[in-house]
């Protein structure tokens, strides 16, 4: 099969991905094989390719927003049948035994494994995944449109929950890429007032098109105090900026798996009055199921641009250079 692997982590423009031919994978017990129809290009893929995430195995195939059709079953599988359309996301496996798993917080499992990091992902024509961690996909969304929902959507939704946005509240979104523009649609559909702060002029224009109340530069102050905020940009220097923008009692959720260093916080200006600063770690399968149902009900539609699988390296370089508006999706 055709695939891309992370050959030598480094700047996206320097070609860390290598196009290769690999043997067709075979599913093991409890696994299914999926013929890939679409795979979203996520910023986590960029972090892996550039070395911000230390590779856990050599020559891994990235990609964890995978949409495709089951074409082979491993021993003991019973959730899916050949021909079923399913999705494969970031969380690939957990131990199921630790106190985190047993308390409904499997995203914190210390033995968790991840698609496109611990095992080959969807920058390929075929991918194998545990059936217990795959998702049935909602009707009414084509393969390219639904792909970004599997990470940008699910993890963004968990970040929104962690931000504790009150009904009809004022939400600030810092950075406006694949995840942020999905979260904005969810929040607006639920009655929130959304203010977007991002360095990209094209992203600010998209935010206004999607119904944001305002859109300004990333380091600017929003037009009103915020009840909640989510930081999607991997820029630690924006943490104090966002904390200052919060009203008293407000919460900032940092959504990225990688963040540059956070500057020293001024307690009086940025933390006092019961403001909260929270991180977000992956998601649970329950988050994924809940979000996919909600996205279908709210008619969330990511803005996507389809790219041939053969252009994966260029798509990742475009993401690194902020040349992607919305989400890019690879199509074999």
Image (spheres, rainbow, N blue to C red):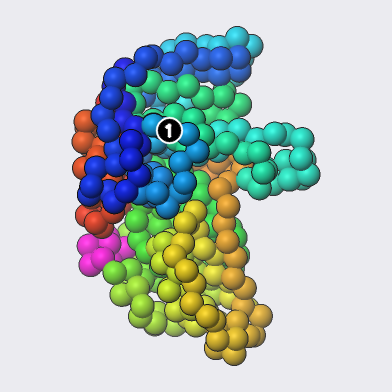
Task: Give whichever of 9, 161 is nearer the camera.
Answer: 9
Q: Is residue 115 visible?
A: no
* Quadrant holding the N terminus: top left
Task: Give whichever of 315, 283 is nearer the camera.
Answer: 315
Q: Residue at x 35, y 73 (%)?
A: 218
Q: Is residue 241 above or below residue 129?
A: below
Q: Residue at x 41, y 67 (%)?
A: 235
Q: Position of residue 217 (x, y in %)?
A: 31, 75
Q: Residues within 10 Å of mark 1 (few under 14, many from 20)?
A: few
Residue 204 within the segment the image draws in magenta: yes
In the figure, is residue 153 to the left or right of 277?
Answer: left
Q: Position of residue 322 (x, y in %)?
A: 26, 57
* Quadrant holding the C terminus: top left
Q: Residue at x 59, y 90 (%)?
A: 268
Q: Which residues are magenta?
A: 200-207
Q: Is residue 267 above or below residue 145?
A: below
Residue 139 found in image quarter: top left
In the figure, is residue 57 to the left or right of 104?
Answer: left
Count every numbered label the image shows and give the total.
1
Q: Is residue 217 above or below residue 266?
A: above
Label 1 residue SS = loop
Task: Give whichever of 92, 140 is nearer the camera.
Answer: 92
Q: Position of residue 65 (x, y in %)?
A: 42, 37
Q: Is residue 25 visible?
A: yes
Residue lying farthest to the bottom in this orientation: 268
Q: Residue at x 46, y 48 (%)?
A: 53
Residue 185 within the segment the image draws in magenta: no
The residue that label 1 is drawn on is 58
Residue 109 found in image quarter: top right
């Amino acid at each position: 099969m055709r695939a891309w692997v992370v050959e030598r982590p480094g700047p996206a423009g320097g070609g860390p991905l290598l196009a290769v031919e690999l043997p067709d994978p075979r599913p093991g017990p409890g696994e299914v094989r999926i013929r890939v129809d679409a795979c979203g290009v996520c910023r986590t893929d960029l972090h892996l390719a550039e070395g911000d995430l230390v590779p856990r195995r050599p020559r891994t195939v990235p990609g964890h927003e995978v949409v495709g059709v089951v074409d082979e079953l491993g021993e003991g599988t019973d959730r899916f049948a050949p021909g079923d359309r399913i999705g494969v996301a970031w969380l690939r496996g957990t131990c199921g035994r630790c106190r985190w798993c047993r308390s409904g917080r499997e995203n914190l499992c210390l033995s968790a494994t991840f698609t496109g990091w611990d095992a080959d992902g969807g920058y390929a024509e075929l991918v194998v995944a545990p059936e217990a961690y795959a998702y049935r996909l909602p009707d009414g969304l084509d393969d390219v449109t639904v792909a970004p929902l599997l990470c940008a959507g699910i993890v963004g939704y968990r970040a929104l929950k962690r931000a504790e946005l009150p009904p009809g509240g004022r939400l600030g979104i810092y950075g406006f890429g694949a995840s942020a523009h999905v979260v904005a649609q969810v929040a607006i559909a639920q009655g929130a007032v959304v203010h977007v702060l991002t360095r990209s002029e094209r992203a600010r224009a998209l935010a206004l098109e999607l119904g944001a109340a305002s859109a300004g530069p990333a380091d600017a102050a929003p037009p009103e105090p915020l009840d909640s905020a989510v930081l999607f940009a991997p820029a630690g220097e924006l943490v104090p900026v966002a904390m200052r923008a919060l009203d008293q009692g407000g919460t900032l959720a940092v959504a990225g798996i990688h963040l540059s260093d956070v500057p020293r916080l001024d307690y009086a200006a940025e933390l006092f009055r019961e403001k909260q600063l929270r991180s977000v770690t992956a998601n649970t399968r329950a988050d994924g199921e809940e979000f996919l149902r909600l996205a279908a009900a709210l008619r969330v539609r990511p803005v996507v641009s389809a790219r041939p699988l053969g252009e994966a390296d260029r798509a990742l370089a475009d993401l690194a250079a902020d040349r992607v508006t919305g989400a890019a999706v690879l199509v074999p």
